[in-house]
Amino acid sequence: MTTTCLVTGASGFMGRHLLASLTAHDHTVLALLRSPDRLPALRAEVDALGGCGDRLHALAGDLASPGLGLNGADRRQAAQAAVAFHLGAQFAWRLPMSRARTVNVEGTRQVAELAAASGSRLLMVGGFMLCNPMHLRRLGIDLERPSRTDWPAVYRRSGGYEGSKLEAHFMVTRRMRELSGALTCIHPATLCGHSRTGHILPTQPLAGLIDNLARGRLRAIPGTPAHWLPLVCVDFLTELTRLAAFDPAMEGSELLVLDDATPSLAGLVRRLAQALALEPPHRHLPLGLLRALLRVPGTAQLLRTEPESLHFIQTHRFDTTATRAFAARHGVPWPDIGAALEATARFAGSAGR
Ligand SMILES: NC(=O)c1ccc[n+]([C@@H]2O[C@H](COP(=O)([O-])OP(=O)(O)OC[C@H]3O[C@@H](n4cnc5c(N)ncnc54)[C@H](OP(=O)(O)O)[C@@H]3O)[C@@H](O)[C@H]2O)c1
């Protein structure tokens, strides 16, 4: 069955791959874009990623504007969507709380209200740390009664980006319940490039790590041998996201999309270094010590490492039983994450030259 879908964050990394997957399956996509004049370039990128750019249309809008900045005609078009995929988010370290809340929390509330009023399923993209309850409690989130959480205190501990993603998740689940709207949540791990081509954008956190390695700025591995940065290939993620959005059994459900075959951080760095023909660092630097170093003025800029990014490096292991069952039920094979890491290193390395 082909349908019309609304996509926010369509011009981003996950967004482009999702557009390719949706249009390759004959869906029509309405992309909410801050710069709709980028439509021809975006169509060409979707074609290059294996989709069909002609099935893509632009709606001028902004998550930070009242009414999402949509004019009346575009709002009516958006209301025709069977599914609203909400990927749009302002991602930046050191994001001020007010800006993070305006785009990532208020923007999400507006997309949720539009979806509920239109009878569209909302496919909300959160993040894998929502599946680490110990981390959420450490940040001060009241998991039994999230509305009682002191969010400004959470933002002080987590930083604006992560705090707003967490607040948006708890807000959207409550709001969709109040509105009796249909909601499916996808929680991706940190994005790895495409499993075969290695395609990745330079703004992605993994591309930043590869750049640090290639430029000799990564002299030690953060954490211990047990620390890891859970990853998922962007093509596997977007395939599962598309399937979850149209799967009746996924209404009201959440899906963690994380590859637990991701090597430890040391193994990951070794694999990247091997693909770039570099000598990897061997020593470990305890996270506490690294955080202390990064408090020294200028060090974060020098090392191109932000303290907020260290939250995602952890020893926690996640339960992926439901993800495995979902992928098996839909016949989607898991890509080889080691090979994908090497392809991503080569892609990012050649893009950086
Ligand atoms: N990347 C990861 O490792 C990762 C891991 C877990 C979860 N996630 C989540 O997955 C989703 C997609 O991530 P991504 O890495 O693909 O994002 P991305 O590449 O940073 O792209 C962000 C997208 O959001 C749009 N956007 C930002 N501010 C906006 C605004 N005010 N109004 C409308 N659109 C706005 C951007 O549009 P412009 O082109 O106009 O800037 C862009 O299309 C996000 O929700 C992110 O939090 C990502």
Image (cartoon, rainbow, N blue to C red):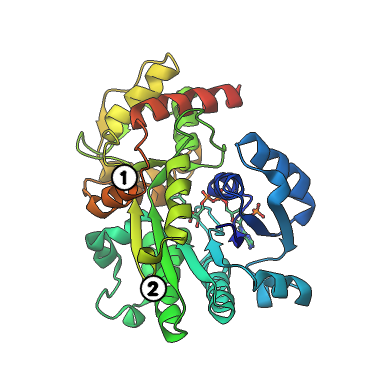
Q: Nearer the viewer, residue 99 or 328?
A: 328
Tell me the residue at 43%/46% (across/down).
237
Relative to 52, 247 lies left or right: left
Q: Residue furthest top?
A: 277
What is the three-letter code of the residue carrying label 2?
A: Phe
**What residue sits right under mark 1 in the picture?**
313
Q: Within 10 angstroms of label 2, few (less than 14), some, or many (20 or more) residues?
A: some
What is the three-letter code of the residue carrying label 1?
A: Ile
Q: Quadrant of residue 221?
A: top left
| Residue 341, image x, y percentages | 40, 29
Relative to 4, 36 lies left or right: right
**What residue sits right under mark 2 in the picture?**
170
Number of the label disc, if any, that sits on residue 115: none
Q: Secondary structure at mark 2?
A: helix
Quadrant of the image where one finds ligand 1? bottom right
| Residue 125, image x, y percentages | 46, 59
**Closer to the N terminus: mark 1 or mark 2?**
2
Relative to 120, 186 lies left or right: left
Position of the N terminus, as image quadrant, is bottom right
Calculate the distance from the C-alpha at mark 1 to the C-alpha at mark 2: 23 Å
Q: Is residue 101 above or below residue 337?
A: below
Q: Within 10 angstroms of label 1, few (less than 14), some, or many (20 or more) residues?
A: some
Tell me the residue at 40%/24% (across/down).
272
The answer as to whether callout 1 falls within 8 Å of ligand 1 is no
